[in-house]
Amino acid sequence: MGVLAAGASYPAPARALWARIDLWLRRPRSVQNILIWLGIYLALAANWPLWNELARIGGAPSTYLPTIAAMAVLMVCATVALLSFTAWSRWMKPLWFAVVLLAAFVQHYMLEYRVVMDPTMVANVLQTDPNEARDLMSWRMAYHVLLVVLLPALALWRIRIVPMRFVSKLWRNAALLLLAVAVALVAAVSMNRQLAPLMRNNVHLRYMMNPVASLYSAGAVVFRPMFKRSRKLIPITAGTSRAYGEGWLSRKLLDAVHIFNCRALQREEGLRSLAPLEPLRIGCSTAVTGGLGESQVGWIGVI
């Protein structure tokens, strides 16, 4: 049993250990150094669903261990490259902690419900009402989240950042981004024979890369509609009549579309006895048939 100091609530060895850890944490560091360590931590602590899935797909350790190592390098590089845009000052600490918190929640739901964070899942999450969110809360979730966020929260709280001039931060951030991209390219090229078929045959793996996949999917859900062109939908017969007469080949192709649609309707309606039709002068009327709706083709006849 350790000896308690006067007025202290912890044994002397524990206080001495904490003092050494706190002294190490409070050592001034550059923002770039902090983000590299944060990327390494997130790749190791917040990607267990990805590592488990790679182990399941690989089967033997000799197969999946090199793949896990290559994916870990890619994860670190992707996270560092993304965070390099925020490597400015100590006021970015809340944003870095928010990324860690997001990674912790995403890992919990991937482990518990075996989901991946693609844009569809992120859209579902954004549409979740408070009652549904309350049903997903549990002590198990709190345990999983605290297990991931406790250490980086303590480090971000105690760590000190070296003040730098704006120009120095700018070129350091650019160098960090270029270094992350270069290392990722080297790792991807060196493991291309293993990673290319793996990612092609298991598309869901790209949405298990935490937190990069979650941030990408959230950005796709938020920003993609802003750049999406609205297209006016017209009935197929309207488009055919508009383009009819643009040329001999166009008329043939459009008549072939007419024949295909009309015969599909014929099979659906059970109309079997029809007179032979001329190949280039076949059309469909817009009469309404039972159960098909007003915009569907009705019967077959000669124009």
Image: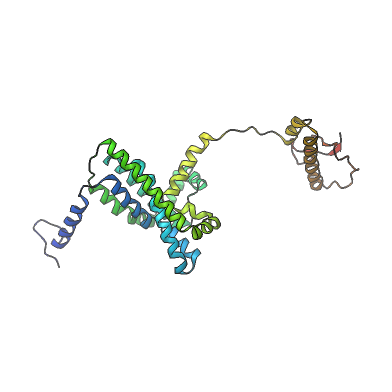
The residue that appears at 43% across and 51% down in the rendered structure is 185
The residue that appears at 43% across and 57% down in the rendered structure is 71
Quadrant of the image occupied by residue 201: bottom right
Q: Say whether residue 139 is visible.
A: no
Taking depth in this image into account, of 85 and 155 the one nearest to the observer is 85
Q: Say whether residue 4 is visible.
A: yes
Name the side, left or right, on which 33 lies relative to 301.
left
Which image quarter is the N terminus in? bottom left
The residue that appears at 51% across and 54% down in the rendered structure is 204
Residue 131 in the image, given as x and y percentages of width and height? 45, 46
Residue 179 in the image, given as x and y percentages of width and height? 36, 48
Taking depth in this image into account, of 158 and 181 the one nearest to the observer is 181
The relative height of residue 52 versus residue 78 in the rendered view (above or below) is below
Quadrant of the image occupied by residue 275: top right
Name the side, left or right, on which 52 lies relative to 297.
left
The relative height of residue 68 versus residue 277 in the rendered view (above or below) is below
Taking depth in this image into account, of 100 and 242 the one nearest to the observer is 242
Name the side, left or right, on which 45 lies relative to 117.
left
Q: So how many labels did they put on this image?
A: 0
The residue that appears at 79% across and 47% down in the rendered structure is 268
Residue 183 in the image, given as x and y percentages of width and height? 39, 52
Taking depth in this image into account, of 17 and 131 the one nearest to the observer is 17
Which image quarter is the C terminus in? top right
Residue 272 in the image, given as x and y percentages of width and height? 87, 48
Please, which colouring scheme is shown?
rainbow
Name the side, left or right, on which 202 lies relative to 85.
right
Q: Residue furthest left?
A: 6
Quadrant of the image occupied by residue 17: bottom left
